Each structure stands twice: as structure tokens, then as C-alpha cells.
Amino acid sequence: MSPLCYVLSALTAIFAVCCILLRRKGKSFEGMLFKFLASFAFVSVATVGYSFSPKETYYFCLISFALMFGFFGDVLLGIKEIAPKFKPKLIVLGLLFFSLGHICCLCAFVTQIGIQPLTLLAGTLGGVVAFVMAGVLKMKVDFKLRLVMSVYYGLLFLKIAMAAAMIVINGAAPAYIAALVSGICFLISDTCLGILYFTAVKRKNILVTAELSTYYPAQILLAMSVAMM
């Protein structure tokens, strides 16, 4: 793997830390700019990693699409910080782009192990759990958005299950371990985000920090999985 991948990963981490610190200080616009820089950096990790070791072309292409959808999702969610009147629409659009990214990831995992019925069951159960938990946490969402969130969480659980299946079927390769940890980090990050957006939480800074501190490792590790192939 090219040393440049490590450099870009380190830059992503630095930009992410700057974003977190600025957001904690209430500087939304400056934090948004560093968030975009971090997003661009993790997209670059996959591109550089593949260019130095061009293997698994389909996997690289699909993961690249996933990272780009994540970048666009970041842009949409970043805009809501400076245009709060569009917040509801931007959240839904951001959710759509991230969902497309997760679907691309799932397609990438399918290129490695095919479709596994047990993972589909795990995704379905994950979606049901998410639907129930939205009620338990008293999230301020209508029925339609609750269903959308449940489908989204179903994708997250399916993604984790597929990554675990890659390890079970093909062995504990570094790329597969990175993909699994990435999926778990995504689940933690999006759970923090859901609580932050849809519940009357008081200590928002803690959740913002937890969300960003798991989101960027998730994206870096996903990008690194391409370089590790």
C-alpha cells in the first residue's frame, strides 16, 4: 500500500479534528469547510490506493461511488448548518445520498462473496429494531420518516453482516476487517446523528463529537479497504 494513503488518511483525521473543534465552538461555517476538506481527502485515499495497486476493479469503482455519495451527503448536511430553514429537506436528501452510498458498498461486498441469505435476515431484523427504538427514544418523526429511517438502518445492519460474512467466507484479510470496523463506526455515528436531530437532547456537543469521531474513521477505513485489497 502506498505511503501516500497513510498521509491522506492523516490529513483526513486532522481536518476532521478541526471540524469537531470548530463545531464545538459554535463556528458552523468554518466547521463545514473543514468537513468538506476531510470528505475530499477520504475519497482521495481510495483513488490513490487503487492507482498504486490496481486490483479488484469492480470493488474499487463501487467503493468510490459510495465515498462520493458520502461526500455529497456531507455537503447537504453541511449546508443545513448555514441555511437552517431548509433543514428538514436537507436531512432527507442527505439520508438519500448516504443510503445510495451504503447500497454501493453492499454491491462491492457482493463482488467478493455473492448474496448471502443470512445477511439479508440480519438487515431486516436491524430495520425492525430501528423502527421500535425510534418509538422508545421518542424521536420527533412522522410515520413515513420513521419507515425511511428503518430502511436506512436496515442497510447499515446488512452492511455490517456482509462485511462479517466476507471474513467468515474468505478469511480475515485486512481489507475485510477494515470494512467491518467501518460498518460498525457508521452505525454508531448515524445513531448519534439520529438522536441529535430527532430528540430533545441537551448536551449536543458530546453527540456532535461522538458522531464525527466515528464517521470519519468509518469513511477512512472504507477507503483503506480498497488500498488493502
Image (cartoon, rainbow, N blue to C red):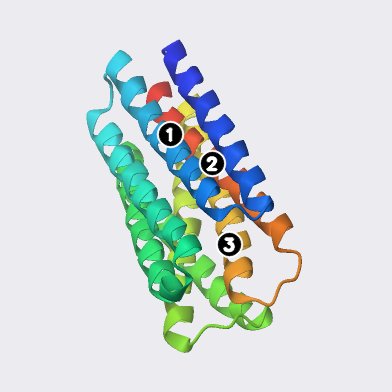
- Whether residue 21 is situated above or below residue 142 in the rendered picture: above
Give percent across and percent down for residue 92.
39, 70
- The Cα atoms of the two marked residues, 3 and 2, are separated by 13 Å
Q: Which mark is residue 42?
A: 1
Q: Determine whether 43 is above or below 143 in the image.
A: above
Q: Residues within 10 Å of mark 1 (few under 14, many from 20)?
A: many
Whether pointer 1 and pointer 2 mark residues with C-beta atoms closer than 8 Å, the reply is yes
Q: Residue furthest right?
A: 203
The secondary structure type at the circle numbered 1 is: helix
Q: Is residue 100 left or right of residue 23?
A: left
Which quarter of the image is occupied by the N terminus? Answer: top left
Please state which amino acid type lies under the numbered disc 2. Answer: Tyr
Q: Residue at x 32, y 44 (%)?
A: 68
Q: CA distance from mark 1 to mark 3?
A: 20 Å
The residue wearing badge 3 is 193
User: In this rendering, would 115 be left or right of 164?
Assistant: left
Sequence-wise first label, 3 or 2? 3
Q: Nearer the viewer, residue 21 or 184?
A: 21
- Image coordinates for residue 98, horizontal then vertical, percent: 39, 56
* Residue 136 screen position, x and y as percent: 67, 81
- Residue type beneath disc 1: Phe
User: Above or below — where is 220 with respect to 99?
Assistant: above
Name which of mark 1 and mark 3 comes first in the sequence.
Answer: 1
- Residue at the (58%, 62%) spot, across then down: 193
SS for callout 2: helix
| Distance of label 1 from label 2 (alpha carbons) | 8 Å
Please give the label number shown on residue 173.
none
The residue pinned by badge 2 equals 216
